[in-house]
Image (cartoon, rainbow, N blue to C red):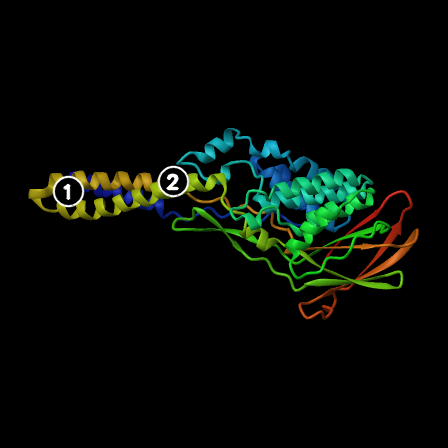
Amino acid sequence: MKIATSISLLCAVLFTACQAPAIRHAPEFNGDLVAAGHRKIAQAPAHEKKRWQLITAVHALKLGRHDEARALLATAMPSAGQILQADARTRLAQSLFSPENVKGFHGESHERVMGWFYRGMFYWMDGEPDNARACFRTAQLMDALAAQPEHRADWVLLDYLDGYITTKLGRDGSDAGTRAQANAGTTALPDYNSKANVMMFLQFGFGPMKKTGGDVGEKIVYDGGHSQTHSARITAGGRTIIAPVFDDLTFQASTRGNRAMDAILAKKATLKKGGDLVGDIGVTAGAILASAPKTEGAGVALLGAGLAGKIIGGSAEPYADTRTWTNLPQHLSFAALQLSAGTHTVTIEFLDANGIALPDRQKNVSVTVQTDRDTVVFVAD
């Protein structure tokens, strides 16, 4: 009877562990990515809303719906201090038996950088370059905790834009420019032109995606992003310039260093692996011993310990949070133009690694140059 009961319990545990995961169906789609995004925001639980706000903001940005994108980013991006505060859901994620993804989504450091980067671009677009610079500096701070010193606050474009705005405001931006060039390595960055009045923000390709790594999924690793575009050729006002790649998001994501949650996930992983090991040994040895009359008692006890180990190991939740801001780019680029007031057609050709224009990628953008502020243009390949 004891053996039958123990085997029944074991079967119940193993059946529970082997159930197929629930299938999550894709949302309905009517061709309008922004509308689909707003539906997801409305339907998502509170701890998921910010991720959908960020995703929808980029969809809106690419479609030129700047007011929507600006509002979504403002809602989704908390202050740096708020990011570090632990709320009830964060504390729940830190417990041994809850997954990390129950906490609110704030993204990894490269995702937080991009949120502040886009906000800075919008401030510049609105004629507030000083606030734009503050956002770029905040973005750089989001990358200040990388494990290796050489990877801390090493985004090229953020320092470059910091120095550019400082120069345009009539002060010395050379220190920031020097830092940017040092991090750019062999890529020669354009000199600052304080008279430039058209600021072109460009992004290329598809950014990195998170997945679980480690023995039991306790680590975040990245599937690298991809971009056929490696630079852009911009023609306007009878002049042609090349806009190089300033930053690679896969590089930034993979050099972020350790997170506060990593140590907690490592403990969860140890518990899971230990529980599973005890469970495997206890169940196997216990079943063998319990089958012989002389060792039945010891076998049942060992089988019970094995079942307890299986339950503990199966209940631990060491899996890293792989929720991703899914429509970030692989590369960031920038170019500054000096054009006369009025409307101009700017031609952008996207070039591959050999400097050859990619077919069917050319864009012609109508740009109206104003006299009271810089004109900020966003283009994605």
What amino acid type is highlighted by mark number 2?
A: Lys
| Residue pictured at 88% horizontal, 51% vertical | 368
Q: Is residue 39 visible?
A: no
| Image quadrant where one finds the N terminus | top left
> 288 and 98: which one is in front?
98
Taking the view exactly as shown, the residue that stands out farthest to the top is 88
Task: Give the distance between the C-alpha atoms of the residues marked 2 and 1, in whole angstroms.
Answer: 30 Å
Reply above or below: 134 against 361.
above
Taking the view exactly as shown, the residue that stands out farthest to the left is 294
What amino acid type is highlighted by mark number 1?
A: Gly
Residue 368 left/right relative to 91? right
Residue underneath mark 1:
299
Mark earlier in primary sequence (2, 1):
2
- Within 10 angstroms of label 1, few (less than 14), some, or many (20 or more) residues? many
Question: Can you tell which of label 2 and label 1 is closer to the viewer?
Answer: 2
Q: Position of residue 188 (x, y in %)?
A: 71, 60
